[in-house]
Image (cartoon, grey):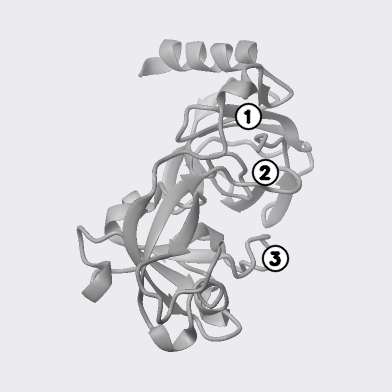
Amino acid sequence: MGLLGFLVVVLLSVLNFVHGFPRNNHAHHRYLGPWINAHATFYGGGDASGTMGGACGYGNLYSQGYGVNTAALSTALFDNGLSCGACYELRCVNDPQWCLPGSIVVTATNFCPPGGWCDPPNHHFDLSQPIFQHIAQYRAGIVPVIYRRVRCRRSGGIRFTINGHSYFNLVLITHVGGAGDVHSVAIKGSRTRWQPMSRNWGQNWQSNSYLNGQSLSFLVTTSDGRSVISYNVAPAGWSFGQTYTGGQFRF
């Protein structure tokens, strides 16, 4: 896109967003897509301990605020990690022997590798066991479901965990509301211009600039094109291994 084009995008974001929220918020709805057929299984044990970590890089899902409402996505849904953080509503259907009434909302936190139901082009959700048992009986093992993308409701701001070292800033971005799935990030030190970050893996975003001793701001854009700018989230005395909280998308 080039530096000029990138700066134009940043400028437009500043003009269109006030305190991290779009002025035309009424145009955005809770539901981001239609109902689609899929299947669901479960993993991770009764306490969901086996779901910790995962291909999105979130680590401890309890401390990150995701809890047990999580899913590993098949290849067709995972999009090489770009779907990390997206939220989905699921209902068990067409299997009265095993289905339970109601629906659940889960966040994509892991990848279900190819093999069986997770083979392409299948749309498949490998849910944590506790949340699976909200829509189906344990003995079912696998059930047909319908799903749709929904907006993520988060309490508190987006979290930025800064790892790495000087000239290699690896920022894990979690607890993202709205569309939930981060598709681009820019970073700005108090003595630098806005710089695009590259996605390293999952939702870990990388900058090779020397930013030590500078307060840090972030521009986060999700798959629906909405952006939130969090100014001076990390103070000039920030340190590696620490987490800082910024603005948030409205639900």
Q: Secondary structure at mark 2?
A: loop
Amino acid type, residue under disc 2 in the picture: Ile
Q: Quadrant of the C terminus?
A: top right
Mark 2 and 1 residues: CB-CB less than 8 Å, in contact? yes
- What is the C-alpha distance between the residues marked 1 and 3? 23 Å
Dividing the picture into quadrants, the one containing residue 219 is top right
Asked if residue 223 is positioned above or below residue 162 in the image, the reply reads above
Residue 68: % across, % down: 60, 70
Mark 3 and 2 residues: CB-CB less than 8 Å, in contact? no
75 horizontally vs 42: left or right = left
96 horizontally vs 19: left or right = left
Question: Disc 2 marks which residue?
Answer: 158
Residue 120: % across, % down: 20, 60
**What residue is rendered at 55% in x and 17% in y?**
10
- What is the C-alpha distance between the residues marked 3 and 2? 14 Å
Amino acid type, residue under disc 3 in the picture: Ser
Q: Nearer the viewer, residue 61 or 25?
A: 25
**What residue is rendered at 62% in x and 43% in y?**
177
Question: Disc 1 marks which residue?
Answer: 228
Residue 148: % across, % down: 43, 49
Q: Residues within 10 Å of mark 2 (few under 14, many from 20)?
A: many
Residue 102: % across, % down: 55, 64
Q: Earlier in the sequence, mark 3 or mark 2?
A: 3
